[in-house]
Structures are given as C-alpha cells and as structure tokens.
Amino acid sequence: MHAYITLDVDPDFTNKNKAWENAREGIERCLALFKEFSLEENITWFVNNAELEFTSRRSDYLSKMSDGEIALHLHLDRPPWSSNYYYLPEKEENIHAAIKKEKKMLESWTIKHLDAQVVSFRSGDLLTSDKLFRVLNRLGIKIDSSLPSQFDWSLKEIGRKILSYMPLSVKLAVSKILVNKRAYPTLPLGATPFMIGQVLEMPIHVYAGGSNLKSGVKWIKKRTAEQIKRGVKDLVIYWHPHEILGKERIFFDYIEYLLEQGFNFRKMGDNYWK
Ligand SMILES: [Zn+2]
C-alpha cells in the first residue's frame, strides 16, 4: 500500500494579515515533521506559484521543498482569472492559457534547478470539469489529483452533489448564503486511480485539515480506515502547510498510524517516473 502526502501550498486566507507568514511557518514545520520520519523525498508539494510568487520572490522555499516533488496548484476561481470564487472560467481556451502560463513559469525553475518538468496538477478548490481535463491532456500533464473520494451519503455531501448539477446562477445564490459550500464534483468513498484520456487521476482520500481536525487525529484516522476497508491501496492525503500550526502532534500521530497500517510513502510523480 502506498500513501501520498500532498500539500497545497496556498496563502493562509483564514488570516489575511499573515497570509504568507503562516504559509512560510507551515512549510518549515511540515519539513521538520517529514524529516523526523525521513519522508522528505516522498512528499508532493502542490505549489500555488501564482499567488505566492515562489519562482520570482521566494525560490529559497522551492529549494527547501525540492527534495520532494514540485507540482502545480492553481486557483482558476480567483483573480486574475475569475473573481467568483466558485467556478472555473467558462472558456476552455482561457483555462488552457492560464494553466499553460503557470506551468511554464514553474518549470522555468524546476528545469533549471532539478532538470525536471512539472508532471502533476491539482485544481484550486477542487474545481474540475470536462473542459479542465481536456486542457490537462492537451498540456501533457501526466497526473491530476483534484477529485476527492468523499461522497458518503451525509446531508452535506448530498447537498453538494445536488448543487453541482444546478445552473451557475443557483450556485452563486447559494454561495452567498453558505460560504465555502463550493459545488466541486466528488467521487464515492473508496475511489481508486483511473485514466482520464492520457492523464492518470489520483483521487484524494483524506483531507487532514479544517474542521476534520476538530477531534484531533480521531476523524482522519477513522476516514483512513474506511478508505482502506473499501479497497484503497493508493491513499492520497492533503492539507495546507499552515494547518499544521499548533497541531503538530496530530500530524505526528497520524503519520505514525499510517506507518502502523503498513503504508509506504511515495510522491505523485513516481507513478510516471518509475
Ligand atoms: Zn488551494
């Protein structure tokens, strides 16, 4: 069994005054944690270069993360591509232009310093569509990890599913009432990797962040056990670096639990390179 620890390296928008400061601190704490378990080379960093400007201003942090894989993370629902915080740009060509530009920008660093292309992608707010997957195929992205395996028949998930089929006007109206109820597409629990054209889709199984940490390590362990029970052998986990702050113990205990379960750790790109 393989476990993939993936980090969405975003600004900390829960604390706008410390958006970068908390992200930076989070990266440092995560690196220290991974070092304790000798996992540095098996971590996938989905880097939001558009908003954190690593290639132009913070390349020292790219170097620190580069023992693992540098992958692309992009919020196409935020400026300059859109200001709706809710859906992908309408036109496929706009999605294409944005991802192409950001991939090239990140590769300007990875090719020079690591002799490696960017092969893995995760969409911001897990927003996906047929258009997005066509674009990923066109751009030669090898691995996508944007589809969460989380539909569990809870009211919240049923609501999200229904909303995802609604017209945009309804989605926007609902989003005004219920902040953060983004209608991203989901997969059932127990989803395993599959191909979308030439792109390998690696579904996400555990979000180790936000309210899922309310009960400490309990909920994320329970969700992990459920996914294993349903036959998941490639377990994809994610959180944002700043979510570790003040909660280091939870993450330490969780990694110990994953080791106890017999997981080996890999990075996304290993599915393409090896
Ligand atoms: Zn993000």
Image (cartoon, rainbow, N blue to C red):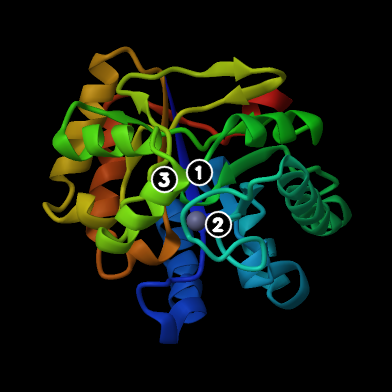
Check disc 1 and report its element: helix, strand or loop.
Answer: loop
Q: Which residue is mark 3?
A: 238
Q: Is residue 103 left or right of residue 45?
A: right
Give x and y (percent) for residue 268: 59, 34
Query: x, y (%) of residue 230?
Result: 27, 14
Label 3's element?
strand
Residue 226 position (above or below residue 54):
above
Which residue is situated farthest in the bottom direction here?
17
Residue identified by numbered label 2: 77
Question: Looking at the image, can residue 38 be seen?
Answer: no
Residue occupying image coordinates x 61% and y 47%? 68
Q: Mark 3 and mark 1 in contact? Answer it, CB < 8 Å.
A: no
Which is more toward the observer, 128 or 73? Answer: 128
Q: What amino acid is found at the position of numbered circle 2 in the picture?
A: Asp
**Distance CA(mark 1)–CA(mark 2):** 8 Å
Cβ–Cβ under 8 Å for marks 1 and 2: yes
- Give the mark, 1 or 2, whose residue is nearer the N terminus: 2
CA distance for labels 3 and 2? 20 Å
Q: In this rendered view, identify the residue nearer to me: 155 or 51.
A: 155
Position of the C terminus, as image quadrant, is: top right
Three-letter code for the amino acid on which mark 1 is drawn: Leu
Q: Tell me: 139 left or right of 129.
A: right
**Residue 12 is drawn in which quadrant?**
bottom left
- Label 2: state its secondary structure: loop
Give the residue displayed 11% in from the left and 52% down from the top.
215
Mark 1, Cα crowd under 10 Å, few <14 / some 14-19 / many 20+, is many
Crowding near the residue tagged with mark 2, few <14, some 14–19, many ≥20 C-alpha atoms within 10 Å = some
Taking depth in this image into account, of 84 and 9 the one nearest to the observer is: 84
